[in-house]
Image (cartoon, helix red, strand yellow):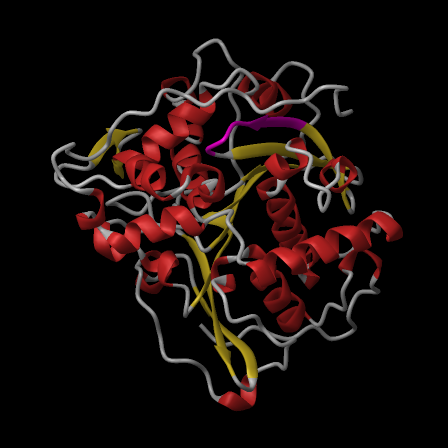
Amino acid sequence: LKRPARLTLLPPPTRPNLSPPSMPWPMRTPLLFAAALVACWPGQAAAETSARALRGHKTQGNACSPFPQELGYDDLAYAEMTTRVCHVNWVLLGKVEYKWEHVQDVGCWTLKALNTNDLMSSAVYQNRNDGRCTLVISGYHGRLQGTKQAIADNVQLGKNKVKLCGYDIYEPFVRLMNTHTSQANWSSVADALGGPGSTCSSVTVAGESLGGSVGEILAACANQGMLSGIQNASLPVWKIQKLFTFGSIAPAVQPIRNALREDGCFEGSRLFISGDVYAGMGSLIGTRHAQMEAVEFFHSKSGVSHRTYACDSKDAVENRKHRAPPLSEAMTVLKRSDDWSNHEVTTYMSDLRAVHNITPPFFHAKPAAAPVKRHAR
C-alpha cells in the first residue's frame, strides 16, 4: 500500500451532543472524560520514546523472521502495530518524527488497508509468512479533539446503553464505531478482510483503549453474522478468531461471548496495568469485558510482574484490581516516565518484553531459550 502523493485526513463527521446541553461541561463525569482524552495522546516522555523507537526502525529496517508465536512475539507485534496506527494521523499531518515507512511495515506484517479521520484510525496488516490478518484499531484521538469535544464524544449521562447484536452496549462507544465504519475508506478494510480478493487466513482484532472497546463490539456482531447492522450492508463480512486489547474500556453490560465457540471464549488476551485507572472505567458505567484471557501487569520499584486470569473466570470480565504477586517475582525493567504512560501501548510493549525475555528491538532478536512462565491462574 503506497502512500499517495497527497494524503489528507478524512473530514470530521457531524458530532451529536451526547450530554444534556444545559449541563456545564466541568460537571460531567471527569474520569470518563479523562479516559477518552488520554487515548492516543501520549505524554511527552512516552511520545519521545515512541519517536525514538520509530526512528530506530527506519535505520534497522523491518526484518521478518518466523518467530514462534508461543514465545510472545505475536503479542509484541500487536502492540507495535497498535502504536503505529495510533500515530497514523501524525504521519498524515507531516510530523517529522513519524514517517510513512514506519506505518507501512511492522516486522513480518505489511499494511493492506487504512481508514482514518480525526476521531479514530484503523488498519489491516497481513503477515507475509502465513497470511494471517490483523485489524488494528487506535484509541480515541484526544489530542486532535481537545477537552470539551472529548467529553461530548465519549460521555453520556442518564440512559446510556443501546441494544446491539444481542448486548446492551455503552452508547457513545457505538456512535464512535458507527462513525468510523461509515467513513469511505472502511470499504477497503472490509474488502481486505472478507472481500473476494482477500487472502487472509484468519482475522485478529488488536486495539488500545477505546479501540479495544470497539474491537469487542465488532467481534460480538461479526461472529454472529450481524456485521450488516454496523456497516454498509453491501460490504463484505468476516469472522474474528482472536482479540488482543491494551487498556481497553469494557463496552457491554453482559460479557461479550464468542459465538463461534461453545465455551464463548475468544482466543487472545486483554492486557491491562493494575495502575491504569482507565482500563477499569467499566465499573463507573456498569459494563464488563469480553470473555477472553486477561493479563494484569503490576508495576513496582522492583520491576514488573503479572498474573493471568482464565477466560471463564469472573476476574477476566470484571473491572477489579488485584493484589500484586510477591516482589521476588518482579522482572527488572527500564525506568518509566512520570506522566500518563501507564495507558500507553509503549508501556505494555516494555512489559511484554520483560515477561517474555525478548530483547528489543524484537524484530531482530533471537527467540529466548527459556521464556518466563506465566503465574498460576
Residue 23 lies in quadrant: top left
Q: Is residue 35 left or right of residue 113?
A: left
Residue 238 location (% of width, % of height): 53, 25
Q: Is residue 253 visible?
A: yes
Q: Which residues are magenta?
A: 113-119
Q: Residue at x 25, y 45 (%)?
A: 254
Residue 347 location (% of width, % of height): 57, 63
Q: Is residue 326 left or right of residue 169?
A: right
Q: Residue at x 45, y 23 (%)?
A: 12
Residue 223 location (% of width, % of height): 44, 31
Q: Is residue 63 visible?
A: no
Can residue 74 be found in the magenta stretch? Answer: no
Counting every numbered tag in the picture gives 0
Q: Is residue 90 left or right of residue 156?
A: right
Residue at the far bottom: name it. Answer: 328
Q: Residue at x 43, y 37 (%)?
A: 145
Compare residues 292 and 42 and report the one nearer the observer: 42
Above or below, 217 against 186 in this view is: below
Quarter of the image with the C terminus is bottom left
Residue at the far top: name it. Answer: 234
Can residue 116 be found in the magenta stretch? Answer: yes
Above or below, 131 against 244 in this view is: above
Compare residues 340 and 122 and report the one nearer the observer: 340
Above or below, 12 against 263 in this view is: above
Compare residues 312 and 203 and report the one nearer the observer: 203
Compare residues 340 and 127 and report the one nearer the observer: 340
Residue 106 location (% of width, % of height): 74, 44
Q: Residue at x 62, y 61 (%)?
A: 349
Quarter of the image with the N terminus is top right
Above or below, 160 against 112 in this view is: below
